[in-house]
Amino acid sequence: MSAKKLTFEQQLARLEEIVAALEKGDAQLADSLALFEEGTKLIAACQKQLDQAEQQVVKLMKGADGAPVELPFEAQED
């Protein structure tokens, strides 16, 4: 399944499945290598989506002069 067709959340869920399968340790070497390769592709795709989202947030946060203003995200307390 192509990472581009999956949502970010679906990619994370698949990564969790891959990690669980690899941690279990009962897969054949070839299968483990294929899972590892799929996982690295998913990580790259997720990182790209996160980078794009960050750039979008920075564009939305502009100062009075129109220049982007980066503000730290503050942890919200419940």
Image: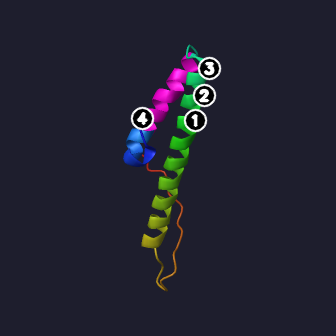
User: For mark 3, what is the residue?
Assistant: 29
Asked whether residue 26 is in view, the answer is yes
Q: The residue under label 4 is which amino acid type? A: Ala
Residue drawn 51% across and 22% down?
21
Residue 60 within the magenta-colored segment of the rendering? no
Q: Gap in Å between the C-alphas at discs 1 and 3?
A: 12 Å
- Mark 2, Cα crowd under 10 Å, few <14 / some 14-19 / many 20+, is few
Are dots 4 and 3 in contact, CB under 8 Å? no
Residue drawn 51% across and 23% down?
20
**Is residue 9 found left or right of 31 in the rendered image?**
left
Are dots 2 and 4 in contact, CB under 8 Å? no
Counting from the top left corner in percent of width and height, residue 26 is at: 56, 13
Residue drawn 42% across and 49% down?
4
User: For mark 4, what is the residue?
Assistant: 13
Residue drawn 54% across and 29% down?
35
User: For mark 1, what is the residue?
Assistant: 37
Counting from the top left corner in percent of width and height, residue 48 is at: 52, 54
User: For mark 2, what is the residue?
Assistant: 33
| Rendered image quadrant of residue 13 | top left
User: Quick one: which residue is furthest to the bottom in this view?
Assistant: 65
**Is residue 27 found left or right of 62 in the rendered image?**
right
Mark 3 residue element: helix
Region in magenta: 12-24
Q: The residue under label 3 is which amino acid type? A: Leu
Q: Gap in Å between the C-alphas at discs 1 and 2?
A: 6 Å
Q: Is residue 10 above or below residue 74?
A: above
Are dots 3 and 2 in contact, CB under 8 Å? yes
Q: Gap in Å between the C-alphas at discs 1 and 4?
A: 16 Å
